[in-house]
Image: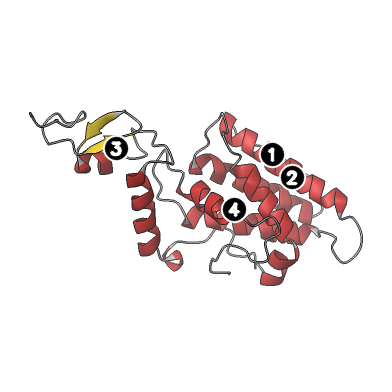
Amino acid sequence: MAATLCSLCNRSRGRRLCPALSRFICAPCCGAARETTLDCPDTCPHLRAAHACELEQLDPRSVEPPCPEVRVREETLRQHAPLLAALARALTAPADPIRPTDTDARQALEALTETCRTRAAGILYEQPPAHPAARLLYQRLAAVLENYRQNRLTGAGALRDGEALEIAVFLLRLAVTRTNGRPRARAFLRFLSDWLPGQSQPEEAPRIVLA
């Protein structure tokens, strides 16, 4: 039987069945095109293996954290863990027709962080992202945050504006440190999805260096 050539380079032997193309490709083309020219589904075993390898090699301290002036406290994340989980679910809605990328999520979280920052300073100002997918994610996040805020207006569980900023910054830092930077990457979103199952009332936030 003749060897199947890679559908991308047409030179090397295609040993990997690419679910994005439904054709065989070689390992070098898989690595080069992954999440750049190919819109890789989360079910791809090679994508999962690559993400796992990238996370093992990742050193969060090597990445400049956004908003370094904001101190994210562990007690804030514990006290408002339901909000953290709800925001994560808003980013990772199953069967989402818009199929957002890590870039969309980061832009949405950047906009949410700025909204929280201005509100904490006594000014309510919103500037949603221009990209449609990022704008939709931002609208979901803002709605979740406002609903949580309204349900906890008084008492020990009330959400302060500064605490909302801490949570937004925490998620933004995750978005920056848990992605590989490829144009169509969903490593950060997959990281959130893996954290969420069985965490209907999470007691612990995803691990990250708090600064």
C-alpha separation, residue under disc 3 versus residue under disc 1:
31 Å
Residue 209 drawn above or below residue 101? below
| Mark 2 closeness class: few <14, some 14–19, many ≥20 residues within 10 Å | some
Local secondary structure at mark 2 = helix
Local secondary structure at mark 4 = loop
**Type of residue at label 2?**
Val
Local secondary structure at mark 1 = helix
- State the quadrant of the C terminus: bottom right
The numbered dot on residue 197 is 4
Do labels 1 and 2 touch, CB within 8 Å?
yes
The answer to whether one can see residue 36 in this image is yes
C-alpha separation, residue under disc 3 versus residue under disc 4:
30 Å
Circle 2 is placed at which residue position?
144
- State the quadrant of the N terminus: top left
The numbered dot on residue 33 is 3
**Type of residue at label 3?**
Ala
Do labels 3 and 1 touch, CB within 8 Å?
no
C-alpha separation, residue under disc 2 versus residue under disc 4:
19 Å
Residue drawn at (59%, 32%), measured in percent from left and top? Answer: 130
Do labels 2 and 3 touch, CB within 8 Å?
no
**Type of residue at label 1?**
Arg
